């Protein structure tokens, strides 16, 4: 009996020691570290804090979504990036995807993170990102490049995470913005206009207008427009004036928004007198008119310069813009480029309803269209332009979903239309107010305008 008792104690003691040893071993042995995937690090350290922010790429309700169509929130970012055709027309034409596995130089995402346009051969793929903030570091950009070159996998560690700790700035941190050379300094004919350096307050977007005299004492023929903007520029646009009797004061800076972000009523009213001349969201573009064509600008001509900048930082940023107008001799101009200004002033939008308004416009001679853009106010949801008449009748040649930042579409192969043919504007409005709305000049009225360039054959 006693022997059995001691044997039992011995067995229990051994079991206890075994359990204790196992428990101690489990405590003393460090757990294997959890390795974050390379894309997970991109999401957590780049996309979420700098891209998937309110107003940018956070959700489909962001004001800018209609323009870029890209949400980078954590649950959908990967599927929205990898293997997806971009919205950007130039990038699409170059055969890019938003992210093309193993091909960083064919990935728009990689190009957008590089603020120096010389990185991608000087081509302009829209505003660099993150817009309104500071550029990513050398290490962050290189991490993204290596991830793409490794096949852009959703899971797995394919890039050394230490790269993300490299804080080397990818662009200069000094205020050393250097303007482009003027045509004169380049040894060619032309004029340079500028918007002088101005501040963009913290967490604010600033859009302004300033009317400048070109300084031409005779008629000039412009066959090239070149733009340069500081970082965080959303767009730079040039405007003519429909009514020359109500021009803004020369050289006066007119802000679109007041300091409290409300619209400046007078500036907005003056916008209704605009006729598009050039520029767009490609803030540093270099646009050349088709061979043998040029835009005729009369002597003593002035135009409105319209820069727009974002600042999503807690410090002050700066805007500054230059525009070169290159001229050619009259004898070298076979066709004079004219501006399309098709303005529909007769429509009515019932309250609390969506309404689609259609209007036909025709030309009274044979024409070739080389550019199209559009204009509505805040109730405009979708602007479509179709060809009217001829063999291409009904073909859609333009579509825009962002009334604040309308697409400027250039046609390398001009749209040829014969006399009597033309364009149809099909505009969908969403009148969310309790009032009937019709054509008008205020922010509570609406517009329906096709702008563009064409020349007569």
Image: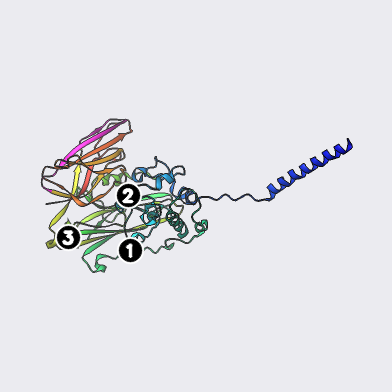
Which residue is drawn at the image coordinates 47% and 59% (left, top)? 139
Q: Is residue 432 above or below residue 218?
A: above
> Earlier along the polypeptide chain: callout 2 or callout 3?
2
Element marked by disc 1: loop
- The quadrant of the image that shows the N terminus is top right
Q: Is residue 101 above or below residue 263?
A: below
Please provide the residue range marked out in magenta. Answer: 346-366
Q: Is residue 56 visible?
A: no
Which residue is drawn at the image coordinates 75% and 45% (left, top)? 18
Element marked by disc 2: loop
The residues bearing labels 2 and 1 have C-alpha atoms spaced at a distance of: 27 Å
355 magenta-colored: yes
Query: In this figure, which residue is indicated by the disc labeled 2?
Result: 88
116 displayed left or right of 425: right
The location of residue 264, given as percent across then percent down, is 33, 45
The location of residue 71, given as percent across then percent down, is 41, 44
Q: Nearer the viewer, residue 317 or 225?
A: 225
Query: In this figure, which residue is indicated by the disc labeled 1?
Result: 179
The location of residue 304, given as percent across then percent down, is 26, 53
Q: Residues within 10 Å of mark 2 (few under 14, many from 20)?
A: some
Q: Nearer the viewer, residue 224 or 140?
A: 140
The location of residue 94, given as percent across then percent down, is 30, 54
147 magenta-colored: no
């Amino acid at each position: 009996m006693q022997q059995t008792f001691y044997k039992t104690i011995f067995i229990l003691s051994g079991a206890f020691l075994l359990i204790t040893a196992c428990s101690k071993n489990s405590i003393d042995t460090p757990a294997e570290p959890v390795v974050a995937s390379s894309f997970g690090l991109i999401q957590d350290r780049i996309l979420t804090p700098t891209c998937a922010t309110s107003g940018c790429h956070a959700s489909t309700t962001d004001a800018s979504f209609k323009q870029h169509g890209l949400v980078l929130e954590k649950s959908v970012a990967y599927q929205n990036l990898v293997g997806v055709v971009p919205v950007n027309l130039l990038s699409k034409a170059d055969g890019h995807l938003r992210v093309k596995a193993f091909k960083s130089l064919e990935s728009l995402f990689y190009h957008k993170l590089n603020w120096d346009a010389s990185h991608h051969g000087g081509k302009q793929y829209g505003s660099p990102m993150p817009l309104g903030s500071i550029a990513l570091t050398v290490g962050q950009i290189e991490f993204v490049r290596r991830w793409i070159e490794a096949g852009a996998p959703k899971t797995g560690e394919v890039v050394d995470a230490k790269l993300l700790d490299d804080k080397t700035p990818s662009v200069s941190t000094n205020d050393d913005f250097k303007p482009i050379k003027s045509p004169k300094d380049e040894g060619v004919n032309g004029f340079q206009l500028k918007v002088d350096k101005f501040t963009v307050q913290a967490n604010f977007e600033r859009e302004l207008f300033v009317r400048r005299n070109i300084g031409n004492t005779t008629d000039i023929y412009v066959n090239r427009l070149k733009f340069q903007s500081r970082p965080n520029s959303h767009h730079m646009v040039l405007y003519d004036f429909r009514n020359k009797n109500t021009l803004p004061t020369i050289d006066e800076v007119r802000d679109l928004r007041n300091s409290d972000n409300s619209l400046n009523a007078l500036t907005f009213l003056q916008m209704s007198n605009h006729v598009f001349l050039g520029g767009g969201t490609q803030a540093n573009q270099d646009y050349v008119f088709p061979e043998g064509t040029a835009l005729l600008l009369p002597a003593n001509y002035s135009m409105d310069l319209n820069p727009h900048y974002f600042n999503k930082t807690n410090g002050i940023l700066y805007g500054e813009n230059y525009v070169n107008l290159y001229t050619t001799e009259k004898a070298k101009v076979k066709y004079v480029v004219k501006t399309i200004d098709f303005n529909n002033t007769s429509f009515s939008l019932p309250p609390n309803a969506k309404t689609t308004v259609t209007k036909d416009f025709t030309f009274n001679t044979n024409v070739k269209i080389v550019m199209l853009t559009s204009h509505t106010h805040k109730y405009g949801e979708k602007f479509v332009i179709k060809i009217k008449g001829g063999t291409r009748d009904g073909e859609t040649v333009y579509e825009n979903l962002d009334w604040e930042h309308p697409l400027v579409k250039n046609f390398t192969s001009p749209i040829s239309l014969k006399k009597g043919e033309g364009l149809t504007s099909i505009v969908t409005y969403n009148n969310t107010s309790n009032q009937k709305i019709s054509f008008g000049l205020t922010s509570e009225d609406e517009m329906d305008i096709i702008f563009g360039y064409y020349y007569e054959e």
